[in-house]
């Protein structure tokens, strides 16, 4: 401490210094006065110096106080390089209206460059200080940059002994800071009253050391520490303020020019007098020591007299004020600890002790004394190596010889590291880890190692105080952020949360369910979304893209409802929306009328005028119906035109009829329909004439003529009946030729009896079909005449001879009969006609073999179709047939046993498991249609199907309409009973019903595919109806023509009154036709997929199934297919639903 050696001697030398003030070079010499009571305010000639207030800055004592600001005693303030004549610049900050949130109350301080206002934060209901720079300084790049540096520097800190900055920005009055309001005056005010008591001064000093340590840990150097920049709360807590000259030690912003001097002269360390860039954190320690000097002496540090300090603090303050930075304390915490230890008066327990000397009070004790007779301190300790007991003043252990000094030094070095680590953890607010470190020091009992005992006590108190204050501050910040969120000011909320130390951002405090991190995430999302919406609105408005903007504006207002311009925009958009809705409703009514008048193109054009913003499902349905009808109309018209041009008029009538259904006002098609109807009538009459002629020829045994006549029928007019008729004619023709050949041979050999038998057998066979063969009948008569004549010529008179002759004839006849049968059997075997063979010879081995071969082939075919019933009828012991039968029975049992589920509108649905079945009608079905080709189909996915048709009650719940209310198509609306099947439903409205119910329940409802419908209807059967083949019991299962229409009940009936099929499904036959998903395709069965067929991809009509109360029995069969344009709703058309599995 060579620079202060003269002070301890009570002598003064002269100290000379040269200070460079920016662009003005000023040489000032300060001579140390010969007296020790100087306040540092006198002139060189001994005159009284006046306080110079002209250089008052916003950083002075009034910054956060109600008191009027004043400089430190004898201080001079410089602006360094803050040249107010800099070029004007734009800092890019958005102008903010402070009056919207803050109510200014009074002026706290005012200076040449700005002012500090006391204000009330109306949102958070707390006092704040608003600090502004104004005038030319507000337009100075350097001044504003330094101003913002203060905001950014303090905002990065979070300490109870540093004044907090809440916000910063620019208003019409210039840049501003919103700061914590500290209303207890400044330390400078306190110093004006005279010296502060040492204990209180040390307490204030140590707290400022804590705050300064926090700043230095963040690489921030204050560079203007003085009493005026330390504010006092009303309960005496000091807070360091005015970081306007602060420097981030990790970044060179170029803000301070080389050689510039900034700060307050009396509190500047020597290096800061030379140039600002020479300062570091140790410069702040010098300024704080100078401030400590003023606290203790009440005098300015312009002239420092160390001997005026309390004796026990002289050496530690002298070290803090060393000219060389290297010879000062190296950290705020080190300086703080040294001051606390010096003030406490405890001795350095690590020093060398004389024999019997107490380490605590230095009292001499007898060598054998265990405790100090003055202060009761322990005089015996354990060796730091072998732990054997020894006297504290012994230099070496008497047991192991270990030198204690080096061991003490080593232990103290270890404790110093522990202390330093604990202090760092405390600065970082890692409280638990700091406690864990500090207790290592606190648990030490060796008197020689008590150097840090005082530190531990102080540290524990500081840690608890810090934890309490930090948690309270955290709770306050969280509450403040939530308040900002409720005020929709997410930016302020995020700025508030930036003040939460990183180590506390995951901490939960009482009264708050959110951590800082969670709040930051939530507010960031809202802030980001708000900015996105604002940008979108600006862009859309700029481009005049108004469509769909209202939902965006509404979302923006939910995030920030206080935006008047956005509220106005919303009102304008809502008015525009009302206009669009009115236009939409007009268009809907017009398009509906056009659709009813079958003006499909016009309806589509009308609907296309509606804005997408107000487009809804009703419009979509209407447009879909109109577009589909228009597409189908054009498709069929093109098809008709092509057919007419190519003169291909066959089967054209259905297309013409469909076109006329779609659009009745087509005169050319009306005429074409009449022509085609006439042509079809003519063709039907001609076909009937041909068939009648063939039937007459058949009855006359003109079998070849039958074939020739039937062959004149066009291929498309040939039915299963005509085909069977021709096949029968062919078979009988072949048999007749065989008979003729055999009879001719017999007659040529005068074998009349053989001819008689052959002809007789043939005629008796065709007589069963009412066929008469006159030629062979004549030949039979001739043969019988020949036989009679021969008998008369024999003239066998004698009875005995006659009797013998008769016996011989009988025997001969029997033999002939046997021979004839053998010949027929032989012929039949040659023709593989095993039925004739087994008819004449039931035990014929070859006939039985042929029967077995044919049966086996039929079994193979039936197995490929899964037709286990046919398999078992042909081969009762067939293992695969029995397996299929068992599996089918098991499936049927499972389905029967499974209870239906009930949905939200009281629909009952039955689970139908996946499986394979024969779809369509077998070829031997007498009423089979040619488009019912039987084929094997697999349903790969199980599904739920409604146990009944959709009822009127269910329809009204979902759709709110009554389409059956007007019976304009020939049917009666019937009763309004809710349990009657809904009717007059077209395919599109059925689809809409499914869509609405699906949306309401969150399940997928739809119409069944045609394959699913027949699979569910058949319920495991291959018969015409799900109950079998007996048409007489149809009335037990179905409402159809005979038990409804014919008795005057010409309307739909209640569902579920008839018997269900084996799956528990009601009214699958009759009551109302049921819409299926598929387009209708006449030849679709011939090429449909074997698994999950969905119908043709395009068509003119949709499939209807099941028949109705209008139809005869053959139209209620499981396989019967009907079709209708999807836009038509008929009096006997309804539907049932399928629900897909989740």
Image (cartoon, helix red, strand yellow):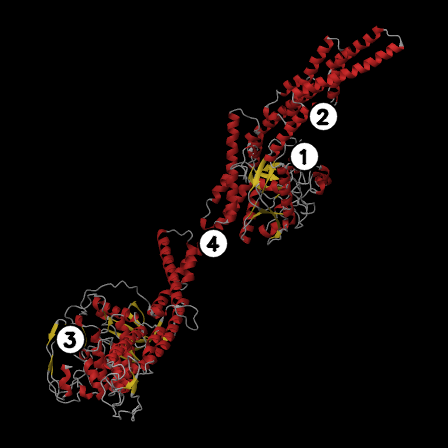
Residues marked 3 and 1 touching at CB (< 8 Å):
no
> Which element type, helix, strand or loop, lies under badge 3?
helix
Q: Is label 4 in contact with label 2 (beta carbons under 8 Å)? A: no
First reached walking from the N terminus: tag 1 or tag 2: 2
SS class of the residue under badge 1? helix
Q: Residues within 10 Å of mark 2 (few under 14, many from 20)?
A: few
Image x and y of residue 3, in percent: 14, 81
Tag 2 residue = 843
Q: Position of residue 1014 (x, y in %)?
A: 61, 40
Q: Is residue 75 above or below residue 1018?
A: below
Crowdedness near tag 1: few (<14), some (14–19) or many (≥20) residues, C-alpha within 10 Å: few
Given this view, does label 3 or label 1 mark the residue nearer the observer? Answer: 1
Instruction: State if disc 4 and disc 3 touch (CB < 8 Å).
Output: no
Q: CA distance from mark 3 to mark 1?
A: 120 Å
Question: Few, some or many C-alpha atoms within 10 Å of disc 4 (few <14, some 14-19, many ≥20)?
Answer: few
Q: Is residue 709 above or below residue 182?
A: above
Foreground: 993 or 805? 805
Quadrant of the drawing holding the N terminus: bottom left
In what element is the residue under mark 2?
loop
Which is more foreground, mark 1 or mark 2?
A: 2
Precedes in sequence: disc 3 or disc 4: 3
Instruction: Report, in whole angstroms, how far the alpha carbon at label 4 lies from the one at label 1.
Output: 73 Å
Per the image, the residue denoted by label 4 is: 578
Residue mark closest to the camera, 4 vs 1: 1
Marks 4 and 1 in Cβ contact (< 8 Å): no
Q: Nearer the viewer, residue 132 or 1114?
A: 1114
The spot of residue 16 in percent (x, y) is 10, 80
Q: Residue furthest front?
A: 399
**Distance in Å between CA atoms under marks 3 and 2:** 138 Å
Residue at mark 3:
273
Q: What residue is shown with label 1?
A: 873
């Amino acid at each position: 401490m060579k620079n202060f050696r003269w002070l301890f001697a009570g002598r003064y030398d002269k100290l000379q210094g040269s200070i460079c003030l920016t662009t003005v070079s000023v040489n000032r010499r300060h001579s140390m006065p010969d007296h020790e009571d100087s306040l540092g305010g006198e002139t060189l000639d001994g005159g009284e110096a006046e306080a110079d207030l002209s250089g008052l800055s916003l950083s002075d004592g009034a910054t956060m106080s109600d008191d009027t600001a004043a400089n430190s005693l004898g201080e001079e303030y410089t602006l360094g390089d803050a040249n107010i004549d800099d070029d004007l610049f734009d800092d890019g900050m958005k102008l903010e209206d402070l009056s919207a949130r803050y109510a200014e109350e009074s002026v706290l301080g005012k200076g040449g460059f700005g002012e500090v206002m006391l204000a009330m934060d109306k949102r958070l209901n707390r006092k704040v200080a608003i600090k502004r720079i104004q005038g030319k300084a507000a337009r100075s790049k350097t001044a504003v940059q330094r101003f913002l540096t203060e905001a950014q520097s303090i905002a990065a800190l979070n300490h109870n002994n540093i004044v907090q900055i809440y916000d910063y920005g620019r208003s019409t009055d210039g840049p501003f800071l919103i700061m914590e309001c500290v209303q207890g005056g400044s330390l400078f005010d306190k110093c004006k009253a005279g010296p502060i008591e040492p204990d209180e001064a040390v307490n204030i000093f140590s707290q400022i050391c804590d705050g300064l340590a926090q700043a230095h840990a963040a690489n921030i150097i204050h560079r203007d520490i003085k009493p005026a920049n330390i504010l006092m709360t009303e309960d005496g807590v000091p807070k360091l303020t005015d970081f306007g000259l602060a420097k981030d030690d990790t970044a060179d912003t170029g803000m301070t020019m080389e050689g510039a001097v900034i700060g307050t002269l009396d509190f500047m360390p020597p290096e800061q007098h030379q140039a600002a860039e020479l300062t570091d954190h140790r410069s702040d320690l010098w300024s704080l020591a100078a401030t400590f000097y003023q606290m203790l002496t009440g005098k300015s540090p312009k002239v420092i007299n160390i001997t005026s300090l309390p004796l026990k603090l002289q050496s530690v303050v002298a070290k803090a004020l060393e000219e060389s930075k290297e010879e000062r304390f190296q950290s705020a915490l080190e300086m703080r600890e040294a001051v606390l230890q010096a003030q406490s008066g405890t001795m350095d327990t690590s020093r060398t002790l004389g024999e019997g000397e107490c380490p605590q009070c230095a009292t001499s004790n007898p060598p054998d004394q265990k405790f100090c007779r003055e202060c009761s301190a322990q005089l015996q300790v354990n060796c730091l190596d072998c732990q054997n007991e020894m006297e504290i003043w012994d230099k070496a252990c008497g047991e192991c010889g270990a030198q204690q000094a080096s061991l003490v030094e080593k232990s103290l070095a270890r404790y110093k590291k522990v202390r330093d680590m604990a202090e760092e953890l405390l600065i970082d607010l890692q409280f638990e880890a700091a406690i864990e470190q500090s207790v290592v020091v606190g648990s030490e009992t060796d008197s020689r190692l008590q150097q840090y005992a005082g530190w531990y006590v102080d540290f524990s108190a500081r840690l608890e105080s810090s934890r309490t204050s930090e948690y309270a501050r955290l709770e306050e910040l969280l509450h403040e952020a939530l308040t900002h969120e409720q005020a929709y000011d997410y930016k302020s909320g995020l700025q508030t949360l930036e003040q939460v130390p990183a180590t506390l951002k995951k901490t939960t405090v009482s009264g708050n369910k959110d951590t800082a991190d969670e709040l930051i995430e939530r507010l960031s999302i809202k802030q980001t979304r708000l900015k996105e919406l604002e940008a979108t609105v600006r862009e859309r408005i700029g481009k005049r893209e108004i469509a769909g903007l209202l939902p965006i504006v509404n979302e923006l207002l939910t995030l920030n409802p206080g935006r008047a311009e956005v509220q106005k925009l919303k009102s304008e958009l809502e008015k525009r929306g009302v206009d669009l809705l009115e236009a939409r409703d007009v268009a809907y009514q017009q398009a509906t009328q056009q659709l009813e008048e079958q003006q499909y193109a016009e309806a589509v054009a009308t609907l296309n005028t509606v804005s997408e913003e107000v487009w809804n499902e009703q419009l979509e349905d209407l447009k879909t119906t109109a577009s589909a009808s228009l597409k189908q109309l054009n498709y069929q018209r093109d098809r008709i035109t092509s057919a007419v041009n190519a003169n291909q008029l066959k089967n054209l009538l259905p297309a013409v009829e469909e076109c006329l259904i779609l659009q009745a006002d087509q005169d050319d098609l009306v005429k074409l329909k009449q022509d085609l109807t006439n042509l079809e009538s003519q063709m039907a009459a001609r076909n009937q004439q041909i068939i009648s002629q063939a039937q007459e020829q058949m009855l006359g045994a003109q079998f070849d003529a039958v074939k020739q006549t039937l062959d004149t029928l066009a291929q498309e007019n040939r039915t299963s009946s005509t085909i069977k008729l021709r096949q029968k004619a062919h078979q009988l023709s072949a048999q007749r030729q065989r008979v003729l050949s055999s009879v001719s041979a017999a007659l040529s050999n005068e074998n009349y009896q053989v001819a008689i038998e052959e002809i007789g057998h043939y005629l008796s066979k065709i007589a069963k079909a009412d066929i008469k063969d006159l030629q062979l009948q004549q030949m039979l008569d001739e043969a019988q005449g020949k036989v009679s004549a021969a008998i008369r010529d024999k003239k066998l008179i004698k009875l005995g001879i006659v009797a013998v002759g008769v016996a011989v004839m009988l025997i001969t006849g029997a033999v002939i009969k046997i021979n004839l049968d053998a010949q027929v059997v032989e012929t039949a075997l040659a023709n593989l006609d095993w039925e004739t063979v087994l008819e004449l010879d039931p035990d014929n081995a070859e006939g039985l073999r042929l029967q077995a071969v044919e049966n086996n082939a039929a079994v193979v075919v039936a197995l490929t179709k899964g037709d286990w019933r046919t398999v078992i009828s042909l081969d009762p012991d067939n293992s695969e047939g029995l397996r299929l039968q068992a599996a089918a029975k098991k499936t049927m049992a499972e389905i029967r046993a499974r209870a239906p589920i009930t949905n939200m509108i009281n629909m009952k649905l039955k689970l139908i498991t996946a499986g394979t079945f024969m779809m369509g009608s077998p070829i031997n079905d007498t009423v089979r249609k040619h488009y019912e080709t039987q084929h094997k189909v697999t349903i790969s996915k199980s599904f739920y199907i409604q146990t009944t048709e959709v009822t009127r009650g269910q329809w009204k719940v979902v759709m709110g309409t009554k389409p059956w209310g007007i019976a304009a198509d020939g049917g009666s609306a019937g009763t309004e009973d809710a349990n009657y099947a809904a009717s007059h439903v077209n395919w599109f409205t059925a689809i809409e019903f499914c869509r609405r119910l699906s949306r309401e329940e969150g399940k997928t409802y739809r119409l069944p595919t045609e394959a699913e419908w027949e699979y569910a209807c058949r319920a495991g059967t291959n018969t015409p109806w799900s109950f079998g083949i007996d048409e007489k019991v149809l009335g037990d299962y179905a409402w159809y023509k005979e038990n409804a229409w014919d008795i005057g009940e010409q309307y739909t009936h209640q569902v579920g009154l008839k018997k269900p099929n084996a799956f528990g499904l009601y009214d699958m036959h009759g009551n109302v036709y049921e819409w299926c998903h598929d387009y209708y395709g006449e030849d679709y069965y011939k090429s449909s997929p074997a698994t999950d067929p969905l119908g043709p991809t395009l068509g003119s009509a949709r499939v209807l199934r099941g028949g109705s109360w209008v139809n005869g029995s053959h139209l209620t069969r499981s396989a019967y297919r009907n079709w209708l344009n999807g836009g038509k709703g008929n009096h006997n058309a309804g539907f049932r639903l399928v629900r897909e599995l989740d």
